[in-house]
Amino acid sequence: MNQFIENILETLKKNGFPDKRVSLPTEKMYEAADNKGFSFNQVLEKLKADHNIESQIGPEKIVFSQATPVSPFAGMDQEQMMKQAQEMMSKMDPEELKKIQEMFTNMSPEQKEEVLKKGKDLGII
């Protein structure tokens, strides 16, 4: 099944994925998986779990798209978010922290304002 998934990933990439949504023929995909002896629904589940790829199954085609990443702070209150952010930062090596600080320092005032606004909206500032 892993080789089949790798072939799907290659095909998606050749067609502009993840920047674009890519569609493949529904019947052909189910038949190809069946010919290899496994369920295409399991393939779709594995693509979702392992590669964060969503699929919408239609009668003619299956549309693949990159799933929206879930924030590591999803479902947390402000105190939990701060604790999680501090924990994540403590695990970074000094070089990573330095790069982030330099990146922030080199931002325009508008970009800094936008980052701070997003932080406030998320409740981490």
Image: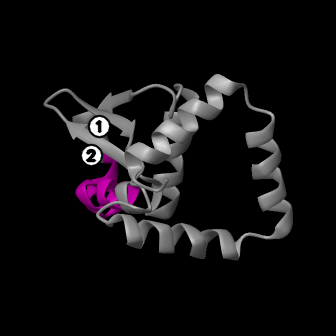
Q: Are marks 2 and 1 in contact (CB under 8 Å)?
A: yes
The type of colouring in the image is one colour
Position above or below: 97 against 67: below
Of residues 16 and 111, the one nearer the viewer is 111
Q: Position of residue 116 (x, y in %)?
A: 54, 40
| Left or right: 24, with 99 as reference point | left
Position above or below: 125 against 80: above
Q: Position of residue 71 (x, y in %)?
A: 42, 55
Quadrant location of the N terminus in the rendered image: bottom left
Residue at the disc numbered 1: 28
The answer to whether one can see residue 8 in this image is no
Dot 1: within a 10 Å radius of its alpha carbon, few (fewer than 14), some, or many (20 or more) residues?
Answer: few
Magenta region: 32-47
Residue drawn at 28 percent across, 62 percent down: 42
Residue drawn at 73 percent across, 41 percent down: 104
Disc 2 residue type (three-letter): Glu
Dot 1 lies on which element? Answer: helix
Residue drawn at 53 percent across, 52 percent down: 6
Disc 1 residue type (three-letter): Lys
Q: Position of residue 31 (x, y in %)?
A: 26, 46
- Identify the disc placed on residue 47: none
Whether residue 79 appears in magenta in the rendering, the answer is: no
| Left or right: 21, with 14 as reference point | left
Residue at the disc numbered 2: 31
Residue at mark 2 to residue at mark 1: CA–CA distance:
5 Å
Position above or below: 117 against 81: above
Dot 2: within a 10 Å radius of its alpha carbon, few (fewer than 14), some, or many (20 or more) residues?
Answer: some
Of residues 93 and 50, the one nearer the viewer is 93
Whether residue 42 appears in magenta in the rendering, the answer is: yes
